[in-house]
Image: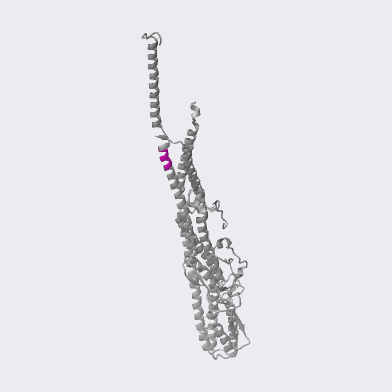
Amino acid sequence: MNGVTHFYVGSTDITSALASGGGQIGGLLTARDQTIPTTLASLDQLAYGIATQVNSVNNAGTDLDGDNGNAGNIFNAPAQVAGSAQSMQVVLTDPNKIAAAGLGLGTGDGTNAVAAANLATQAVINGQTPSNFYSNMVSTLGAAVSETTIQGTELSASLTQLQSQRDSLSAVSLNEEAASLQEFQRSYQAASQVFTILNSVYASALNLGVETAVA
Amino acid sequence: MRVDPFFVTNLSVPLDQTQTAQQQLSEELSSGLRVTSIGQDPVAAAQNVQLLNQIQRDDSFTQTTSLTQGLLQVTDSALRSVVTQLNQAVGLATEANNGTLNASDLKSISNQLAGIRDEVLSLANTSYQGQFVFGGSQTGSTPFTLDSTTTPATVTYNGDGDVNTLVSPNGQSIQLNVPGNQVFASSTADVLGTLNNLIADYATGTASGGVADTAGLTSALNFVSQQRVTIDNSITRLNAASGVATTEATQLTAVQTSLMQADIAQVSTQLSLTQSQQSALISVISALGSGSLFDKL
């Protein structure tokens, strides 16, 4: 579905249940279905904004060939935001088609080139400059990676603690084993003593009170 | 005390952790960078993006200034020569206007002024790397053309009044040219028109009209000198802005280095500790694994 693998039990899609269920597969599915698409969407926004704005500026000036307002695109024009980053590429092959001059001005003018350079400091991507947008994206992605790593470490520590707690209840206790061993030894000794006494009683009975006849 | 029945499994977890830490520290040592992935320090990674961006802008501006300095120097040189030529022309005109020269001398001065006019015209059509510097935005075609069929001769300006500017990374706008119609053919200080008038004045062998035109030429000379000041100012501002950009790039690089650089001594110590921990863990696992209940049979 949508180019990604889904998991079914019978006809029931359990992908989201697996993702929210934790564990390794839950983590992988969360990264695939949430974290990576969010980052890709940001990249698409950045690519779409840059491509459309730069193309727009280039088509608002005059190029070296004297084209007024129709110098053409520098980047391939994205039809929609989704997939813009993947499809982004420079389609300009002739440097004469860079419209550096203002509309209708001679080729020596640089007004439109200045306008293109000013895009770097204008809020053209979701109300932010391209540089700030990318910087924030890096920060957000880095924070997600950092948070996940910390969570992983915390869960690992938690697992170790739980295992220790479990072991404190169910694992082999040397004290208990030593006590039991001593108890069993005493029991064995007591049982042996019973046999010794019984042996002595039987001997007395067989010898009719003469203790030395049968030992 | 209870004996952990899963001791090997539990020991493999810290062994994995020490191995990961060892790889991370080795990477920091080999690259010299403290942050080798954005997850290690997201804030530093984001700051690094901004720093790189600003450094690149500074570098681009510095490269551009080295190109435009040549243009401004050629423009300045041309204007300096124009001033020299106009001073000579004013001298000749003053001589012609003093009333002591005969018709033949005045015609000779007219011819000399024509030579100066041609020289000024040539300077007004100065080009730099194939682009005419006084054409405004019309840098691809000769800015001034002379028509000698009329009396006085006429000069046509083929450019426009466009002024180009270079914007520094800090937003400073620096003028890169003075359009030819402003320098050589303005309504208040028409250098070429006044020269043509003087040539026509003295070509007839009389000095009538020469005084007024000489005053006009002097005024034009002063105006050209003022325009030269504009270009000189631009050269000074461009050099200053280039210096600021270079210094800023150096400072930002230093900030970037301190932000991203690994403390080699600290990382080395950590790596040594991690290796000791790893060796100890391996020894423990080895010692525990060597014993078996079957040995007790």
* Quarter of the figure that contains the N terminus of chain B: top left
Task: Tell whether position B282 is magenta.
Answer: no
Answer left or right for B94 relative to B130.
left
Q: Position of residue B232 (x, y in %)?
A: 50, 73
Residue A104 quadrant: bottom right
Judge whether residue B69 can be spotted in this image.
Answer: no
Q: Between residue B257 and residue B85, name the one nearer to us.
A: B257
* Residue B146 left/right relative to B247: right
Q: Which residues are magenta?
A: A162-168
Q: Quadrant of residue B100?
A: bottom right
Q: Position of residue B158 (x, y in %)?
A: 59, 80
- The location of residue B25, given as percent across then percent down, is 48, 47
Percent position of residue B160, x then y: 56, 79
Outermost residue toward the left in this view: A209
- Structure colour scheme: one colour
* In the image, farthest residue toward the right: B149
Q: Nearer the viewer, residue B221 or A120?
A: A120
**A123 and B164: which one is in front?**
A123
What main secondary structure does the magenta stretch of the protein show?
A: helix
